Amino acid sequence: MKLTILALLFTALGWSQEVATPDVPKLQAEVQRNAKVLKDWANLGRYRADNATATTPAVVFMGDSITDGWGKKYGGQFFPGQPYLNRGIGGQTTPQMLIRFRPDVIAHHPKVVVILAGTNDIAGNTGPSTLEAIEDNLMSMVDLAHANGINVVFSAVMPVCDYIKPQTARRQPEQIIALNTWMKDYASKKGLVYLDYYTPMLDDTQMLKQELTYDGLHPNDAGYEIMVPLAEKAVAAALKLGTPRK
């Protein structure tokens, strides 16, 4: 009787009585991912073993999947022959990077850290954020670096596009522009090097060039080919800087 009444109610309201069958394997995978995140939210375990054996690098690259995938999925090798350390972790936001800044950057005593972060904050990967919160985390990383004699390169957040997959709904271009504008201004005030990945990767519609990406967000081989000389130039400039101001 109750089911009949519910069926009539659904029909009257125009609701479907069909219930989607849950994707059990997908749900199980999501539960496992969430459990792993809860145990180590900042993913401090990702590089723990490597950190224990790493030789002292001149430069550490701190970032998200764009740094993480550099020389692994795309981009050939990661600066072959150079004493550079890759400490990118896919999907990460600035608060997560701030937590692991000591073990993954400071503990190596590099001369320079190259920070590429912010796109996942804008996308809300670890919850809603604001530009002010992103800026606070970036400033805290700078403070930590300078307090330990490490010069900083601020990398511009790269543009996105919707040509392959929808990206701009989560990563609004105006938010990216605003963050990059702040970073450029802050870098000038604090004696940092500003690395502009954004401008050279724009097309005529102010979106990420389709030929430089495989999904509208991450660079492909051609995208990294654009990034490599820009990063090398920025690192060279940072290595010439004197002891950073605290």
Image (tube, rainbow, N blue to C red):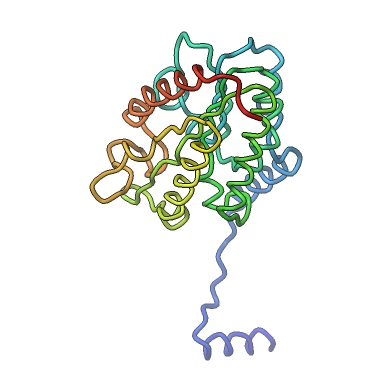
Q: Quadrant of residue 45?
A: top right
Query: Relative to the observer, which residue lies in front, 28 or 90?
Result: 90
Q: Residue at x 56, y 35 (%)?
A: 190
Name the spot of residue 14 as percent of width and height, x first: 49, 85
Q: Position of residue 120 (x, y in %)?
A: 54, 46
- Tell me: 47 left or right of 185: right
Q: Outermost residue toward the right? A: 39
Locate the N terminus by quadrant: bottom right
**Quarter of the image with the C terminus in it:** top right
Observer-nearest of 55 and 235: 235
Going 59% across and 59% down the picture, which residue do you hit?
22
The x and y percentages for residue 222 are: 31, 29
In-front residue for pair 40/188: 188
The quadrant where residue 88 appears: top right
Residue at coordinates 44% horizontally, 27% vertically from top-left? 73
Residue 77 placement, left or right of 100: left
Q: Count of labels shown?
A: 0
Residue 121 spot, x, y in % from top left: 56, 48
Residue 59 vertical position relative to residue 12 in the rendered view, above or below = above
Q: Quadrant of residue 227?
A: top left
Q: Is residue 61 above or below residue 39?
A: above
